[in-house]
């Protein structure tokens, strides 16, 4: 069931103040009865993370890697992602927001929900970047921080691709459709498309099947996602910066108290594996409790949604760490949790 919170007079990074309507869903056990896992969605995702239509149902569910019988799953919608259709709040002033603002919104919401500690923060793509932002904002909040196919900064390559997306979204006569077609080319890889289509053409009109596939994805997103939502989420991708403008990413990341488990994709053309490996090597000199896993796939960025067997294998050891120790001191965690 979709629930909501009102966060009044929220001041964003540009200094503008407005009320934020934040929607969310809870799955599994109640927050007061079990460890809580915060799941952050990707650009076109939402809070429906499990169940028949859940976008991460292969990872989250009864007797799955993240077991609903053992955990409470909390999933916020990034404000303005359009999950409630015309009733939702849209941000025409989307360029005033940074991803850190969304992390601050989540922190305030956790306080309102009286959730003072998390067993884990996990997310893929922009959801993983948001996990980084929240973990740095609240270094003692989570025992485990799991950013998947993401980064703690916006690289030049990422900004370049998102700037093209922004240009399409603001200039095309069919913006969501056309931007999605462009996005699919860097969510996958040349090898992935060759494996899927093999240069085949439609027998009737000799159009390449890959063309029809791109058109299908453009039309599919156009029918379920709003232009305002796409503009906001794409813009937020260009504002990932745990250093808050200082460029001292490692110093910021090293303040996170919980275990950090980076999951990268060897063929990712969006959040490059090389960047994640560099982060792991350099951060491991400052922080002992950090690990990295690499998904081996031809499918590029989308592999975090496709290669669920590999992802489950990496994450199972983390989410089996529930027992009497955690339950015994559950109520004492997060005493230093404060909103700043």
Image (cartoon, grey):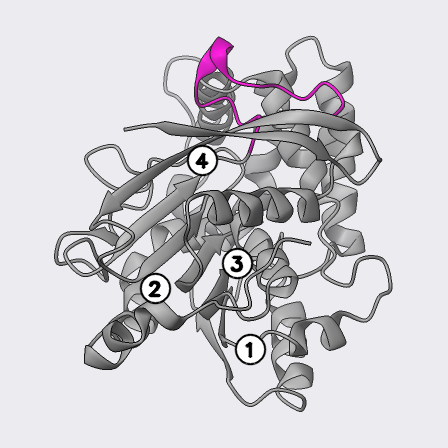
- The residue to which callout 2 is attached is 311
User: Which residue is nearer to you in this view: 204 or 30?
Assistant: 30
User: Which residue is nearer to you in this view: 204 or 155?
Assistant: 155
Which residue appears at 36% of the width and 19% of the height? 203
- Label 4 crowd bin: few (<14), some (14–19), many (20+), radius 10 Å: some
Residue 59 at least partly seen = no
From the top left corner, tell me how far across and down residue 260 is, in percent.
Answer: 51, 74
Residue 164 placement: quadrant = top right
Cα–Cα gap, marks 2 and 1: 24 Å
Evaluate if marks 3 and 4 touch, with contact meaning CB atoms under 8 Å apart: no
Residue at disc 2, secondary structure: helix
Evaluate if marks 3 and 2 touch, with contact meaning CB atoms under 8 Å apart: no
Residue at disc 1, secondary structure: loop
From the top left corner, tell me how far across and down residue 248 is, in percent.
Answer: 81, 71
Cα–Cα gap, marks 3 and 1: 21 Å
Residue 254 placement: quadrant = bottom right
N-term-proximal mark, 3 vs 1: 3
- The residue to which callout 4 is attached is 45
- Label 2 crowd bin: few (<14), some (14–19), many (20+), radius 10 Å: many
Cα–Cα gap, marks 2 and 4: 18 Å
- The span picked out in magenta is 79-93
- Number of labelled discs? 4
As drawn, is 84 to the left or to the right of 254?
A: left
Evaluate if marks 3 and 1 touch, with contact meaning CB atoms under 8 Å apart: no
N-term-proximal mark, 4 vs 1: 4
Residue 287 at least partly seen = yes
């Amino acid at each position: 069931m979709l629930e909501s919170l009102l966060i009044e007079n929220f001041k964003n990074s540009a200094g503008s103040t407005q009320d934020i309507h934040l929607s969310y869903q809870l799955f599994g056990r109640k927050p007061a009865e079990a460890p809580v896992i915060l799941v952050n969605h990707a650009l076109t995702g939402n809070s429906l993370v499990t169940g028949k239509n859940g976008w991460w149902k292969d990872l989250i569910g009864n007797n799955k890697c993240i077991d609903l019988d053992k955990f409470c799953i909390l999933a916020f919608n990034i404000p303005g992602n359009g999950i409630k259709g015309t009733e939702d709040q849209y941000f025409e002033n989307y360029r005033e927001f940074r991803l850190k603002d969304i992390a601050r919104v989540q922190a305030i919401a956790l306080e309102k929900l009286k959730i003072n500690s998390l067993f884990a923060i996990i997310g893929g793509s922009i959801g993983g970047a948001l996990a980084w932002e929240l973990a740095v904002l609240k270094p003692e909040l989570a025992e485990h921080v799991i950013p998947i196919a993401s980064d703690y900064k916006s690289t030049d390559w990422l900004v370049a691709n998102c700037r093209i997306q922004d240009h399409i979204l603001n200039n095309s006569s069919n913006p969501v459709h056309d931007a999605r077609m462009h996005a699919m080319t860097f969510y996958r890889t040349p090898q992935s498309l060759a494996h899927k289509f093999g240069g085949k053409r439609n027998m009737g009109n000799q159009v390449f099947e890959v063309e029809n596939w791109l058109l299908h994805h453009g039309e599919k997103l156009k029918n379920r996602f709003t232009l305002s939502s796409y503009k906001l989420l794409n813009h937020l991708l260009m504002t990932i910066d745990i250093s808050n403008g200082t460029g001292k990413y490692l110093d910021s990341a090293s303040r996170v108290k919980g275990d950090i488990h980076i999951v990268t994709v060897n063929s990712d053309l969006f959040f490059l594996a090389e960047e994640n490996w560099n982060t792991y090597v350099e951060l491991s000199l400052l922080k002992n409790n950090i690990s990295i896993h690499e998904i081996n796939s031809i499918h590029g960025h989308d592999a975090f949604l496709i290669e669920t067997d590999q992802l489950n294998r990496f994450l199972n050891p983390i989410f089996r760490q529930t027992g009497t120790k955690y339950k015994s001191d559950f109520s004492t965690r997060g005493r230093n949790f404060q909103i700043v």
